[in-house]
Amino acid sequence: MESPQVRTSTSLAYEICAVVVLWVALFEFNSWLFSAVEVSRYINWIFLPAALRVVAVLVLDWRGVAGLFAGALFTCAPQVGVNMAEALVLASLSALAPFAAVSLVKRCLRMARDLKGMTYHQLTVIAVVAALTSAVAHNIFFSLQHASHAWSSVFFPMLAGDLIGTLVVLFTSALVLRALPNIAK
Amino acid sequence: MPPAKHSESYLKFLHLAHALRQTPSLPTLDAVEERLLNVFAAAWHAGRQISTTEAARMVPDASERTVYRRLKTLSEKGLVTFGTDPGDQRLRYVMPTRQTDQYFEKLGQCMEQAQGA
C-alpha cells in the first residue's frame, strides 16, 4: 500500500504536470488561433496562457509556480536556442511575476488564504496587476539585455495581450460554469 | 488540523469558481424584485406610466415599505430608473432602462431555448 508521503508526492507531480501540459497546450493553441495578431512568438495582442498564470498561482501556490516555470521553459527553450540562461530567466519571470502579483493583491485586499469570499472584482484586479507585473518584469530584463530595447513596441502589446487573454479565458470559464449548475453555487 | 494540500487546492478552486460565477450578466433578483419587474413590464408594455406611489400598490402581498426598498435595490442593479413629471416635480415615475430591455430579452431567449429543447 502507498504511504501518505508517496501519495502526496504523486499528487504534487500530477498538479505540476497538469500545469505544464495546460501551459504548452494553451501556448500552442494561442499561437495557432491568434497568429494574425502575433508580434513575436512570445508577444501576442491576445495571450490566453496569461490566464493560466493567474489561476495556477491562485489555486496551487508554489506548485503552480513550478508548473509555470517548467511549462515556460518548455515553450521558450527551443526559441532561444543554445542560450539556456536566457530561457531560465524568461521562465522564472513567467512564473514568479504572477506569484508576486497574486501575493501583493491578496495582501492588499486582505483576501483569505483559501480565497473564501473572493469576488469577481478582486479577480479582475489580480488579472490587471499580474499583466502589469509580467510586462514590467519582462521589459526590465529585455532592457538589461539590449540597450536599444524599445519599451513601447514590447510593453504595450505584452500588457494588452496578457490582460485580454486573461479576461477572455475568465469570462469564457464563467459562462461554462454557469452552464454547469452544480459547481460552487 | 490544517486541510491536506490537495483538498486545500480543491477548496481554492471552488472559491475561484464562485468568484467567476459573479461575472456581470443577468442580475440576481429576489422574488419580490422579480414580481415587481414583471408587473412593471406589463404596464410599460401597455404604454402606462407608473408612479412610485402606484408601484407600491402593485404587489398586494408586499408592504409599501418592502416595495420602496426593492425599488431602491432594482435601481441599484440598473433595472429601473426614476423620472419626474415635467408638470409636477413631486410626481416620480418608475421607468425601464436599457438593462431592463436586455433582461427581458435574455429571459425571452431562455424561454425559446427551453421550448426548443
Image: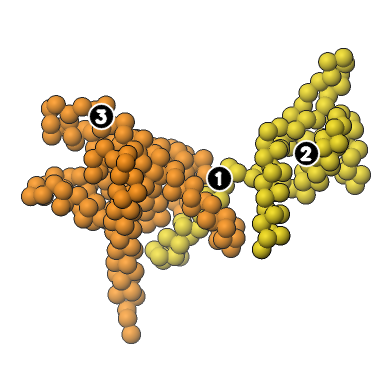
Chain colours: A orange, B yellow
Q: Residue at x 49, y 47 (%)?
A: A171
Q: Please, what is the three-letter code of the amino acid marked with disc 1?
A: Thr
Residues under labels 2 and 1: Cα distance? Answer: 22 Å
Q: Which of A28 and A169 is in front in this view?
A: A28
Parent chain of label 2:
B
Q: Residue A45 carries which label?
A: none
Residue at image mark 3: A153
Q: Which residue is drawn at 30% across and 36% down?
A: A158
Q: Which residue is drawn at 39% across and 63% down?
A: B5
Residue at image mark 2: B70
Residues under labels 2 and 3: Cα distance? Answer: 51 Å
In the picture, the quarter occupied by the C terminus of chain B is bottom right
Q: Can residue B27 be seen in this view?
A: yes
Location of residue B70 by image quarter: top right
- For the residues beneath circles 2 and 3, the answer to whether they share a chain is no
- Dot 2 falls on a residue whose secondary structure is helix
Q: Nearer the viewer, residue A162 or A115?
A: A162
In front: label 2 or label 1: 1
* Whether residue A147 is situated above or below residue B62 in the rendered picture: above
- Local crowd size for mark 3, using a 10 Å CA cut-off: few (<14), some (14–19), many (≥20): few
Q: Residue at x 64, y 45 (%)?
A: B26
Parent chain of label 3:
A
Q: Which mark is residue B23?
A: 1
Residue furthest toward the bottom?
A1
In the picture, the quarter occupied by the N terminus of chain B is bottom left
- For the residues beneath circles 2 and 1, the answer to whether they share a chain is yes
- Local crowd size for mark 2, using a 10 Å CA cut-off: few (<14), some (14–19), many (≥20): many
Parent chain of label 1:
B
Q: Please, what is the three-letter code of the amino acid marked with disc 3?
A: Ser
* Whether residue A59 is situated above or below residue A80 in the rendered picture: below
